[in-house]
Every structure is written in C-alpha cells, then in structure tokens.
Amino acid sequence: MSTRTRAAAWFIPLMLGGVAAAVVVAAIVARRGRSSPAISAVAQEIARANPNVPPEIAAINAQLAQIAALRAGAIYGPGLEKTVRAPIASLRSALGEDWRELGEADGHVRLLPTGTRSAYFQVGAVVVAGKGQARLVLRTSEHKQATAFVGNRAFEVINFGPLPTPTRGPIDITLSSRTSTGEAGGPSLVMSPLQSEFRQAGEWVTPLPALFQPGPAGSRGLYLLPGSSTRFALTPGVRGKCVVVLEGASSRGDVKIAVSMGREAHSVLLRDSLTSANLGPYARSGGVLTVSVEPRHAKPASSLFVSHIRLQPVLSQG
C-alpha cells in the first residue's frame, strides 16, 4: 500500500466524524425551527429550480433519485448479501433503508464508480459497529489494502482512497471486519450503500458525497467552521509547481482562509457568492493539503462552504 493511500485512509476517517455530525445537526435544527446555511440554501434552490413543484415534493424527489443512484452503484456478492434496515434514522433520507451486514465472512463487492474512468477511485460508506470497536479492511483486485477504524460512536463515515483503478476490467473489492488489534474475526458491521467515484489527477478525496450539504447556486459540499483546520488527501498525478483551485463561498460574512501544502501556505478572502479561487503557486505538489478558516476575520455565525478542490499544474514558460 502506497504512502499516499495510507495517508488517505488515515486522514479522511479522522475528518469525517464532524461531517457526519453536521448532517445530524442540520436535521435537529430543522425540527427546532431555526435556520442554518444549508437549510436556507436548499429551500432557495428548490424554489428556483422547480417553480411549479411544491418544495417538499421536489426535495423528496431529489432524495429518491440519490438513493436510486446509490443502489445502482454497487453489486453485492457473498458476505454482503444480507440487508438490514438502516440503524441511523437521521440518515435514512440521504442513504436509504437498505443497508448491508458484514459478518465473519469476507464481503465481496463489484463497484460501478460515477464519473469519467481514471487511474484512481474512492469508495466510502457509513459504518456501525454492532459490538465493540473494529477495523474495516479493504482489499482491491490490484492487491492494494487500506484500513479504517470503526469506533464506539453511533456511526463512522469511512472513506478509502485514492485507490488505483485496475488497468482493465471491473473494480472488485473485498471487505472484512477485524478486531481493534487487527486480528481476524472482528465484530459484525452494518454498512450503508457504498458510494464510489473516479478521481482525476489532483482532485481532493472527499467524505461521502451523498452526505454533502446544499450550498449556493445549486452546489453541494462541506461547511467548515471558523477556527477549524481540515486536511484533505489529494489524488496523485500532478507534479511540480502548481496552484490550488478551491471552489467555495462564505456564509453570513466574509471569511479568510489559508491553504497549506508542505511548508507553503497561501491565503484568500472569500465572499458570499460561489467562486473559484486560485491559491499559490506552490513550489511542488503534495499528497495532502490543509484548509484553515481564520476566526479573527469571520463573524460568529459565518462559515466556509467548499464544493471542490483540485491541484492545477503551472506550465513553465518558454
């Protein structure tokens, strides 16, 4: 397993607990009748995109389309044939009711990633450990292996990647549950439908896209709070001098962010309209970058919305 693959398997699970929690918080806020950036954005976009359809019907249609896409994104084989009802009620609208149980036997899956086929892909799911902590081990047909820790929280959002795509043929993976110490025969795990995507050179490796929140101009992405620093793994393929292209916007007030890669950092001020900001140039590309939201330049209620990040090579002159 390459260093970059290990980095992705390490950094992304650490980051995703907060992302998943944000989804649950949004649902709680909605029930209490208070607004949030994501809820306000989705209401506005539904009204604009479907002027003749009641917003609540349009929202349900969008949820059903997403669940149908998740079902079509993987073919489950031996070891993952048993379906169970989703154990997390707050995630049923986003991920559906049909989850899978991974027991003592290895689970076999054929993935059908979305996007243009490329040299790398990512795959993720929400995972619940039935009894005690566990390690979820993924092996690919290219003999690559990655491991994610499943703790005692209500659920974990797990993401593996970037993983190398087979040069030809289907993308088959094997999943197994191990004990917290890495031994065989780990506890039973309940998993949401797997979601996989091809990743292009330099693209960020994201949390589960099905859990992304609505943002401005119909976009979907992540909200990062002032004072936070979030690390993202990057897909290999961009070398040498480069810039970071970040698509995002501020919410409820201007936000200053700093993006660091290696020993270099560059800053930019984002306003409340979705924009593509170029940061850099950086002397050389890296496998991981960090997005920091500076608290002293942000209002208490503001946050950073990020819909996409990628590296772009800087072509030499002459």
Image (spheres, rainbow, N blue to C red):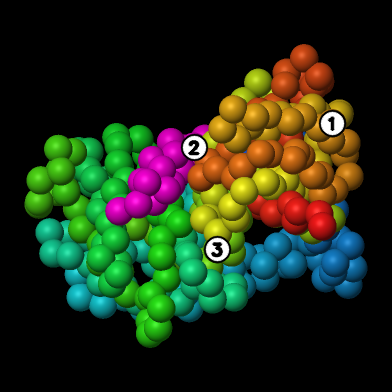
Q: Which residue is mark 1?
A: 269
On the image, which quarter does residue 270 sit in? Answer: top right
In this rendering, the label closer to the viewer, 2 or 1: 1
Q: Earlier in the sequence, mark 1 or mark 3?
A: 3
Q: Which residues are magenta?
A: 1-19
In this rendering, the label closer to the viewer, 2 or 3: 3
Q: Which residue is mark 3?
A: 199
The residue lying at 73 percent from left, 67 percent from top is 57
Cβ atoms at labels 2 and 1 below 8 Å apart: no
Per the image, is 87 magenta? no
Q: Position of residue 187 (x, y in %)?
A: 16, 48
In the figure, is residue 157 to the left or right of 251?
left
Q: Identify the residue at the far top of this view.
A: 296
Who is closer to the viewer here, 135 or 122? 122
The residue lying at 30 percent from left, 37 percent from top is 151
The numbered disc on residue 15 is 2
Secondary element at tag 2: helix
- Residue 127 seen in render: no
Who is closer to the viewer here, 42 or 265? 265
Q: Position of residue 241 (x, y in %)?
A: 67, 46
Q: Is residue 234 above or below residue 171?
A: above
Query: Of the residues shown, which amino acid type is indicated by label 2?
Result: Met
